[in-house]
Structures are given as structure tokens and as C-alpha cells.
Image (cartoon, grey):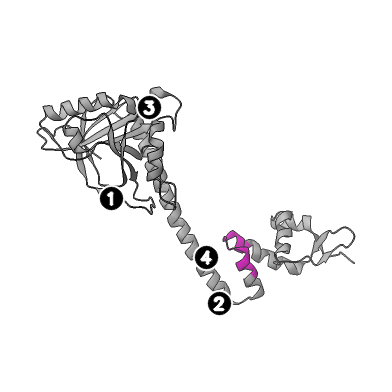
Amino acid sequence: MDRKGLFSIGEVSKLFHISVSSLRHYENVGLIHPEYTSPDTGYRYYGTEQFEVLNTIRYLRALDIPLAEIEDFLKNRDISNIEEKLIQQKKIVLEKQKELKRVEQKISHRLNSLSEAQNMPLDTVSLVQLPAKRIVWVDAPLKIKDSQDMEASIRKLDQSRTEAVVFLGKVGLGISAEHLQKAEYAKYDGIFLILDDEDIYDGETITVAETLCVRLCFRGSHAEAPEQYKKLLDYINKHQMQIVGFSREITLIDYGITNDPEKFVIEICIPVSEIVNTEKMIYY
């Protein structure tokens, strides 16, 4: 056969910036067929009349339109058909943009949390106004010697099948107000998971209201927490405050993101009311 005016698959690949493997795939799925395939060598050759098809395929793929939709259009070329596909693709793109924005916000939360954890004032009791939060709570009487003691309970929190939501800085331990008022802090009454507004969680959740808390951050692990609770309770008693909710003991930095124990940070917040001196209140 006279191959004048024909282009080898390699030449077409360079002309259209489409890989040879993609051209072969397009052939396999029926999008385009070489004008001539050598029976001796199997080499594929394309004619200029196929260039328009390749232009269409390349453009529609740049719009991320699936090959099946492109094939349907090539077999049923019509203005209404391409309009319908473009409108549908626009909807898909807008949904992707929405999802990417949600993911971006989740990343921003984690970056902010890590930044705050590294700059928290340590070993100092302060007053903070914690915003309302959506949480997952599991009643689970626990005594914690190390973080591994929490893993079984964390699995009870992680019931969402939609997406992973458990991460450092989001899981905490709680002691009830009743036990705190009796200075009983040797064991925990439950474990909880803080959900960001953007988190998708298909299990049962509760919302804890905005509340004023006494807070103390320290370097160490949950094993060192009892001493910190004593400091917090002494402060609460000294300032004639009333404990009004469960404590929120959260690991901000631990082995999950660093192998250096000297960088571990834990935060304990206890909700209170009847504040006498509010000069040192910090708002977030």
C-alpha cells in the first residue's frame, strides 16, 4: 500500500502529544482506528482525516470527560448531545471543586492545630472560651498507662464508613464533672472524637455547647495527667469556680507525628462557671 500522506503511530504521538500506549488504548475501546495496519509488522498508520477525531478526543479528555462519553459523542455527533455532555461535565467539575474545598479546609484545620500545639503556653493554667463542637462520645471506663490502651476504644469511635476522621488532636479522654468534683481522676469515664465542620460522619454524634474552660498544657503522656488535674482543681477551688462538664484531655502531639518524646504535648480543659476574675480570658 502507498503510505504517502500517512503518519506512523509514533509520528501521530508526537504531533498530538498523546502517548503511543494511549493511542493503542483508544483503538482498543473503539474511539479511533488506524487507516492502515501493516499485516507484516503490525505497524499502525493514520491519515489526516483522523486528525479531527484525535483533536476532539484530546480536547474532551482535557475536560476530563470519560472515554465512554466521548465514544458516545463520536458515534452520535449532534449539538444537543455535546451540550448535554458539557453541562453534565460542568456539574461534575463543580462537585469536585466543592469536595476539594472541603478537603482544603480539613487540611487547614490540621495545620492550625499543629501550629497551635507547638506554640501552646506550657505548665500554665489559663481561661479559654472553647467553641461549640460536634463530637462522638463513647462511654468507656479507662485507665491509661500508655497510648496503646486507647486503641480498642478508638476503634469504637471510628465507625464512619464514609471517610477517615480519626487523627491526632481530635481524640480525647473525658472525666465526668461528678468525678472531678470529688477529685477522682485516676480513671476516665469516656473517650471522644472531635469532628470538624467539614467531616462527614455517618454515626451518632452530639454537640457540646460553647463553654468557658480552665486549661493546662504540658509535655508528656496521659500517664502524667493526674498531677496536672490536681493543679487544675486547685486553681478551680482557689478561684471559687464550679465544674460544669466533663474534662477534655487531648493529645496534641505524640508518636503519631514525631519520634521525639520531648515534643509530646497534652492539653486538658475543664468546663467551669462562676468566674470571679476574667481578666486573663482567651478567646478562640
Residue 281 seen anywhere in this rendered image of the structure: no
Q: Which mark is residue 229?
A: none
The range drawn in magenta is 59-71
Precedes in sequence: disc 2 or disc 1? 2
Q: Position of residue 281 (x, y in %)?
A: 18, 35
Would you say residue 64 sits in the magenta stretch? yes
Residue shown at 31% from the left, 24% from the top: 224
Mark 3 and 2 residues: CB-CB less than 8 Å, in contact?
no
Residue that numbered label 4 is attached to: 89
Q: Earlier in the sequence, mark 4 or mark 1?
A: 4
Instruction: Answer left or right for 209 relative to 240.
Output: right
Q: Amino acid at mark 1?
A: Ile
**Closer to viewer: mark 4 or mark 1:** 1
Judging by the rendered image, the residue that carries numbered circle 2 is 80
- Image location of residue 208, percent across then percent down: 24, 47
- Report whether residue 261 is seen: yes
Count the numbered circles shown.
4
Q: Which is in the foreground here, disc 1 or disc 3?
A: 1
Query: Which callout, 2 or 1, points to the residue nearer the camera?
Result: 1
Distance Cα–Cα, label 4 vs label 2: 14 Å
Q: Disc 3 versus disc 2: distance between alpha carbons?
A: 61 Å
Pick whichever of labels 4 and 2 is earlier in the sequence: 2
Asked whether the residues under the numbered discs 3 and 4 touch, taking CB atoms below 8 Å apart as contact, a structural biologist would say no
**191 versus 61 height, above or below:** above
Q: Nearer the viewer, residue 11 or 243?
A: 243
In terms of sequence position, does the residue under pointer 3 or pointer 4 come before the other?
4
Of labels 1 and 3, earlier in sequence is: 1
Numbered circle sitting on residue 264: 3
SS of the residue under disc 4:
helix
Image-based side of 33 in relation to 228, left or right: right
- Which is more N-terminal, label 2 or label 3? 2
